[in-house]
Image (tube, grey):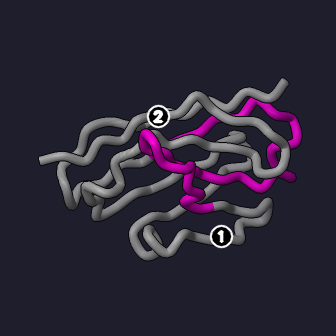
């Protein structure tokens, strides 16, 4: 069973930055499309960004230009660098291997002054 473990969330002021990490135990990580999602209570989970095995990326319009997804296939890790954070970015962030059904437990990001 693949385990995904997120880390790096926390409290940050508007305009600040955070870097989220997700470590995968999967042996086929290098072939997985990896994605970051976020969710706030009573709203649907939103896909923030995803990255293909070779590094191709796609971003949600709401984060394009502010967030950067990257991966290290040697370390089995995917990252989300979040810059210029706004109050609307407050959410629990999850990583997932798209289409394979594995999710992390989430890491909370709170943007507040």
User: How many numbered marks are there?
Assistant: 2
Q: Which mark is residue 57?
A: 1
Circles 2 and 1 in contact, beta carbons < 8 Å: no
Residue 54 percent across, percent down from the top left: 78, 65
Q: Nearer the viewer, mark 2 or mark 1?
A: 2
Residue 41 percent across, percent down from the top left: 43, 39
**Badge 1: few (under 14), some or many (20 or more) residues near its Cα, within 10 Å?**
some
Q: Residue at x 50, y 64 (%)?
A: 68
**Residue lying at the far top of the rendered structure:** 1
Q: Is residue 14 left or right of residue 77?
A: left
Q: Read off the magenta span.
A: 20-49
Q: Nearer the viewer, residue 11 or 76?
A: 11
Residue 91 percent across, percent down from the top left: 40, 44
Q: Residue at x 32, y 36 (%)?
A: 10
SS of the residue under disc 2: strand
Q: Is residue 34 above or below residue 9?
A: below
Q: Is residue 107 above or below residue 38?
A: above
Q: Is residue 15 above or below residue 23?
A: below
Residue 8 percent across, percent down from the top left: 42, 37
Q: Which mark is residue 107?
A: 2
Image quadrant occupied by the N terminus: top right
Q: Which mark is residue 84?
A: none
Q: Residue at x 58, y 28 (%)?
A: 105
Q: Is residue 16 above or below residue 76?
A: below
């Amino acid at each position: 069973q693949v385990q995904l473990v997120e880390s790096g969330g926390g409290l940050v002021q508007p305009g600040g930055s955070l870097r989220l990490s997700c470590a995968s135990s999967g042996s086929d990580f290098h072939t997985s499309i990896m994605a970051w999602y976020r969710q706030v209570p009573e709203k649907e989970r939103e896909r923030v960004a995803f990255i293909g095995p070779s590094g191709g990326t796609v971003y949600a319009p709401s984060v394009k230009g502010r967030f950067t997804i990257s991966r290290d296939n040697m370390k089995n890790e995917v990252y989300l660098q979040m810059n210029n954070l706004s109050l609307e970015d407050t959410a629990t962030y999850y990583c997932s291997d798209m289409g394979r059904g594995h999710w992390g437990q989430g890491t909370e990001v709170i943007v507040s002054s």
